[in-house]
Image: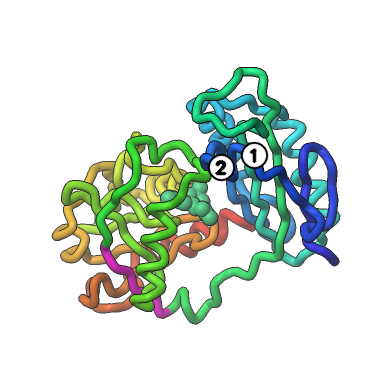
Amino acid sequence: MPEIAFVNGRFLPLADATVSVEDRGFQFGDGIYEVIRTYDGRPFELEAHLARLDRSAQALDLRQPYSRQEWTQFALEAIQRAAFPEAKIYIQITRGVAPRDHAYHDDLVPTVVMTVREFRPLGASVRAVGVEAMTIEDIRWGRCDIKSVNLLANVLARQQAKHAKVFEAILIKDGQVTEGAVSNVMLVRAGTVITAPEGPLILSGVTRAVVLQLARQERLPVREQYCSQADLHAAAEVFLTGTTVEVLGVVRIDGKPIGDGKPGPVTQRLATRFLERTL
Ligand code: PDD
């Protein structure tokens, strides 16, 4: 079964999908995106992802060409056409095609792309052992709450992590932990789950929201506040949340073990609750 693309309202094989070289997404990174995954063929938290897509569009004065209902229909059709056991759905909307000029005309027609590819989740052994991370200075712009395709700082951070042979780059802004390059970061200190507050310095993760809700249901104290890099290193547990990582224990940061160097009890409990939530 071919990987599927959807370009401006038309389904076609991914290999045949193209957009113009004058697309502002290509020339300026002038666009937004979402990544959604399926569990047992069903898109997880699609409504929350589409709501965030709307918020990103509004923040950038970008016309959202489809309603949430239309997006839902297109996504379900794409998943069905691709027929992968599990799929990763990528949605991107750019401001459209125009001769290169930083400022734009209000009447541009947005370019809409959706792709569906096979998604292979992380193996159970990686989850059981946990992953390693490194801290990197957060050099991103001041609107990280917008899920923009402008991902240069994230790209460079991920590449640095890859060279260091660690799983994720944890970003530090003015001494405070913001989030990961492709995930949100949570730590556990004296039984309390702590993560950076929503605001312009982080992406308000869909998984983050689900996990915070699960933590509250589990009667775990939760605090949305910034932590320092020292707090991160001294935490009893650290874990990542995100569409692709779910709830994933971090057992070493900058070469130093976190807690006893294994995914901790709170991480394991929330990972289990999260998995149940996807059924
Ligand atoms: N990234 N923070 C950043 C910077 C992210 O890029 C992501 C997701 C998250 C987690 O958000 P969510 O739980 O809604 O997936 C946090 C996606 C998967 C990506 O860029 O591929």
The stretch in magenta equals: 129-135
On whether residue 133 falls in the magenta region, the answer is yes
Tell me: residue 237, above or below residue 146.
Answer: below
* 159 to the left or right of 64: left
Q: Helix, strand or loop at disc 2?
A: helix
Q: Is mark 2 within 8 Å of ligand 1?
A: no
Which label number is shown at residue 277?
Answer: none
Which residue is at 80% across, 50% downward?
A: 78
Tell me: residue 254, above or below residue 101.
Answer: below
At label 2, the amino acid type is: Gln
Coordinates of residue 203 in the picture (x, y in percent): 42, 43
Which residue is at 72% across, 29% downward?
A: 66
On whether residue 256 falls in the magenta region, the answer is no
The quadrant where residue 266 appears:
bottom left
The quadrant where residue 83 appears:
bottom right
Residues marked 2 and 1 touching at CB (< 8 Å): yes
* 121 to the left or right of 173: right
Q: What secondary structure do most residues of the magenta stretch adopt?
A: strand
User: Could you tell me which quadrant the N terminus lies in?
Assistant: bottom right
* 269 to the left or right of 137: right
Q: Which residue is mark 2?
A: 27
How much space separates mark 2 and mark 1, taking CA atoms? Answer: 6 Å
Residue 190 visible at all: no
Coordinates of residue 16 in the picture (x, y in percent): 81, 56
Q: Which residue is mark 1?
A: 23
Q: How is the image coloured?
A: rainbow
Coordinates of residue 146 in the picture (x, y in percent): 46, 37
| Nearer to us in this view, 82 or 85 | 82
Q: Helix, strand or loop at disc 1?
A: loop
Q: Residues within 10 Å of mark 2 (few under 14, many from 20)?
A: some
At label 1, the amino acid type is: Asp
Q: Residues within 10 Å of mark 1 (few under 14, many from 20)?
A: many
